[in-house]
């Protein structure tokens, strides 16, 4: 987090949190009350100050105010950088993938120590060569359909690791990964 944000939090610790006006779509774009934010300085600020609380609510710390983020899909979105490395939408490099999943819509989900992220369409095609069936062959569309249906095994070779790819339903993502898609204030 920015030093200026940490200082503001220390000076004004009891600023009420904001809900319902900041969101992140499945492509990693930020929206303020339904309007896309395209200002590079604002996006850079969001990237540096994006985090989650112990209840699985993701937020941007805006000075002393915590602004909770409604998530269209997952809290992180993975992209390929110019050097071929996967980075999330906050520019953090994927170095240690922990798990891989595919949902019923063929979204590839990678999990690291920070949490789950959807692999963007732009990043998906370059890493598909690492997605293999149980016999080591590149997974084709029939194999992907069988994996999604839970009828086949697949593995993803990524960052020097081999990860089993597990099928998952989109509706089960928040519970499995302990996050809230639409954060709400604590019940009082």
Image (cartoon, rainbow, N blue to C red):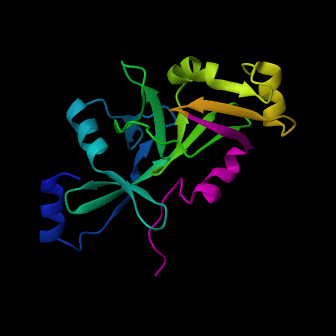
Taking the image as shown, residue 107 lies to the left or right of residue 44, namely right
* Magenta highlight on residue 89: no
- Rendering coords of residue 58 (x, y %): 42, 55
Occupied quadrant, residue 40: top left
Most foreground residue, 29 or 83: 83
Say which residue appears at 50% left-offset and 32% top-offset: 159
Taking the image as shown, residue 39 lies to the left or right of residue 92, namely left
Residue 7 to residue 152: above or below: below
Say which residue appears at 29% left-offset and 44% top-offset: 46
Say which residue appears at 69% left-offset and 40% top-offset: 164
Q: Residue furthest bottom?
A: 188
Taking the image as shown, residue 38 lies to the left or right of residue 94, namely left
Residue 65 to residue 186: above or below: above
Residue 130 to residue 117: above or below: above
Q: Which range is magenta? A: 161-188
Most foreground residue, 19 or 57: 57
């Amino acid at each position: 987090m920015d030093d200026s944000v940490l200082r503001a939090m220390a000076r004004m610790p009891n600023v009420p949190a904001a809900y319902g006006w900041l969101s992140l779509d499945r492509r990693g774009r930020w929206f303020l009350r339904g309007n896309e934010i395209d200002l590079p300085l604002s996006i850079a600020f969001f990237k540096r100050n994006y985090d989650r609380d112990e209840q699985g609510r993701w937020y941007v710390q805006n000075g002393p105010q915590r602004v909770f983020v409604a998530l269209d899909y997952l809290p992180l979105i993975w992209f390929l950088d110019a050097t071929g490395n996967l980075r999330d939408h906050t520019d953090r490099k994927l170095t240690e993938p922990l798990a891989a999943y595919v949902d019923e819509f063929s979204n590839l989900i990678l999990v690291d120590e920070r949490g789950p992220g959807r692999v963007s369409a732009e990043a998906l095609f370059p890493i598909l060569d690492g997605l293999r069936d149980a016999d080591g062959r590149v997974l084709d569309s029939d194999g992907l359909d069988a994996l999604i249906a839970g009828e086949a095994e697949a593995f993803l070779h990524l960052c020097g690791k081999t990860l089993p790819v597990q099928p998952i339903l989109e509706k089960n993502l928040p519970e499995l990964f302990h996050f809230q898609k639409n954060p709400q204030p604590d019940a009082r």
